[in-house]
Amino acid sequence: MGSEARFGLERPDWRKILQAALSRGGDFADLYFEYRVYNLVNLEEDIVKETAEAISLGLGIRVNAGEKTGFAYVNELTLDKILEAARSAAAIASGPGLAKIPRLRTVRARHDIYTAATPLHAVDLQARIALAQEAYTACRRRSPRVKKTKAIYQDNIQYVTIINSEGLVAHDARPMAKLACYAVAEKDGRRESGYSGGGGRVGLEYFRDVLTPETIGREAAEEALRLLEAAEAPAGEMPVVLAPGHSGVLVHEAVGHLLEADFNRKKTSVFWDKLGKKVGSPLLTIYDDPTIPAFRGSYNIDDEGTPASKTLLIGRGVVSGFLQDRLSARLMRLPTTGHGRRQDYACIPLPRMANTFVDQGEHLPEDIIKSVARGIYAEKFEGGQVEDSGKFTFSISSGYLIEGGRLTAPIRQATLIGTNIDILQKIEMVGNDIAFSMQTGTCSKEGQDVPVGDGCPTIKISRMTVGGKGQ
Amino acid sequence: MKANPRGSLESLAVEVVRRGRAEGADEVEVTISDGREFAVDVRLGEIENLVEAGARHLGFRVIKDQKTAYASTSDLSRETVRRLIRNAVRRAELASRDKFAGLPAPTGSGVDAAGLRLFDPELAGIDPQRKIALALETERVALRDKRITNSHGASFVSSQGTTILANSRGFLGAYDQTYCSLSIGLQAGETDQKAEDFWYSAGRYFSELESPEAVGGRAVERTVRQLNPRKIKTQTVPVIFEPDMTSWLIGFLFACVSGVAVYQKSSFLADRLGTRVGNSLVTVIDDGLMPGKLGTRPFDGEAVASRKTVVVEGGVLRRFLCNAYAARKLKLEPTGNGDGTGVSPNNLYLSPGDKTPQKIIASTKKGLILTRTIGHGLNPVTGDISRGAFGLWVEGGEVVFPVAEVTISGNLERVLQGVEELGNDLDFRNPVCGPTVKISGMTVAGE
């Protein structure tokens, strides 16, 4: 099916809908058609417990009038129902309809960042089930102490067509896959869990060439086994070394969210008056790049049809840019950056992160660890949360104690808490070993979930509050 | 936008069951929801977002030879639904035979939905302009206070919907429900020393919502009380949970008593039925039949009748909350908590005591009133708790200063063993809830 015809309407219909959306005035309107097919396979207790297929079909209609947004969505895509929705979205404005829709023209992305040579949604389901089975088996076989394993495979293909009142037409077809394995290990009555996974905007070949299901399963088991030997994390203020890769979640929480343009336009973010100002260590440079091939957070065009581009957020400690969607960019009189994203057709686009990372520095990771007399090495995380005020937490699921410049005992669950500008100033060393976290991350904002990625090199923070139970 | 008449959706549900059987499924269960939503966000006196929409959703499972497949769709066209049914029956063959699979005995027709007060006829008739005015008024009340320096905005949300459930064991049930909420988020303090918080009122009945004055006023009080926080030394002290904090504690307990987590052995309480998990003050009840409450419904997602289940009684773990699958696995009864493939709480609450929160604070020589947490840090496998925390420091029975940038840590079982006092302030605006609770000691990490 051609992408133009996928949603059963034609160009004259699109113009009619946009005209209805702007029938009460309004500066801008867009239509977001989405068709998505998901598949899921769940393995546990040594059996294929369930498979699921889900279809999401709908249209979101947005009208902007100044700072106001009117929004309506429908999942019955008949012209009558759609026009009715367009008129409810139109009601945000009150005035005569001025809409003259220019000639529609299709924009194309600068790159095609999806690397699915063998797209998974087109592969036989049996082959996809086999991926989950391989991960499951590898996890179980790692040790008799692994008492419980779960492997979940998911993929989806999302087709979007975006049309706006400035005449833009854009299409994208975004593949996504994720394979995750959970393990619970037991020893002397103590239970611990482990997790590993991977995927992205990839095809079947990824699970052969980049990250095998066997590795995913084994790593999940090994994390649970390691935690069985782990001591309580200490409590109090101390130096914290962030391991490369997974620690990107700290960058995402502590910095990324507060550089989303909506929070700065509304002056609720601590960064709103700091564009061009120094907020952190000169060692710190942060980018968000939606164009990294195959990554989970990547896309060719954002959900407003803007081609994606790499954006400098913090350059040598100075706030250099915000993550923009159309509305914030227009109101702040700054260029769009291609970060307007939505969970699905029923959601209003918001400025969001894609793949956020700290650029690498010059220190050798071993020198960074050597510089710490007593502290913790944070290796894996369960996630985190930030407030506009800059206060954030993130949960360490596993790490190590650092004693006398060496990694010693493994430690388990602890929470780090801090205030972002304070932490950014306490960055003392940045390693030359950038890595990216597991391709399984999802970010929530205002009830909308979108896939994201993050990364960082080894980083030393001179002091942070660690909340463990140990001494 | 008009919702589809219930009758045509009931026919569609019956048709899905019939067709699933005709395609070869032994059992079929289908749920259809059809709803309308209104939401307005206002900020600094202006409308920011106005959303009006109608949406439908159909989900089903088929079981063939004890093999299960699920499907769902927002496209209710006949062709799509038929294709999904065919795919599902074929996919079921790729799953493994599982002797625990299957629909439960449908007992849900025994509950009279009308008596549960799930639907507010008044709400449907409220003009959008009035809803907008309520949000604007809530923010106006809050911004009158000069200590408030910025607003995240106020929102009014309302929805109404119909849920229909049919299965191949002859069950066909339906109920209508409404929901509305009024909320606001605020900031106080200067750029680099901001405090923020929010408040909301929510329920099924428009007339039961708190007024803009109450919601706005409470949000102001909660926000400004955090201004000029101090850090504290790492120590173990009594911690008083405000009701919103007790909510997440009970939510975490739910994750540990869910029959699914239990049979998966991913709960530290898996082998603890009949044993003491808290002290005698701790009684936790799941009740799906409380009239007018948000966690109330006549039957669960598997057509099992809602009921009242005592989960923890005087500190002793009495029941796990089970869907049909977990119940068969654990040789227990389903409890009316089935929800798709999982288990969800109905109205799940920690039974209140008789003390006012003020009295509980007054009886505390030194301790932390926990007012907010951020982040994750709840592990059902171990029961461990470790979260970023904000609160108020208490000395000599009085609040002396706000505390920020600390973490609290402990273990759910030790927390439930350490319950010293229970407040009388239980409120069901969140269906998973509890009153103010004082815990004898938790680690508070600071400097």
Image (cartoon, rainbow, N blue to C red):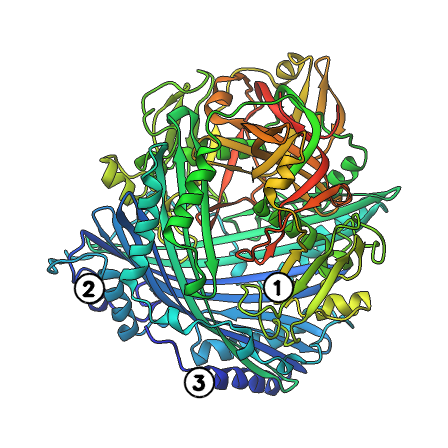
The quarter of the picture where residue A160 lies is bottom left
Task: Please give the label number shown on residue B346.
Answer: 1
Mark 2, chain letter? A
Q: Are marks 2 and 1 in contact (CB under 8 Å)?
A: no
Q: Is residue A291 visible?
A: no
Name the residue nearer the viewer: A351 or A131: A351
Question: Are callouts 3 and 2 both on one chain?
Answer: no
Query: What kind of element bears circle 1?
Result: loop
| Quadrant in the picture for the N terminus of chain B | bottom left
Three-letter amino acid code at disc 2?
Answer: Arg
The quarter of the picture where residue B233 lies is top right
Q: Is residue A373 above or below residue B295?
A: above
Residue B121, given in percent of the width and then of the height, sits at: 41, 74
Q: Residues within 10 Å of mark 2 (few under 14, many from 20)?
A: many
C-alpha distance separating marks 3 and 2? 32 Å
Three-letter amino acid code at disc 3?
Answer: Ser
Query: What kind of element bears circle 3?
Result: helix
2 or 1: mark nearer the eye = 1
Name the residue carrying label 3: B8
Q: Is residue A398 above or below residue B90?
A: above
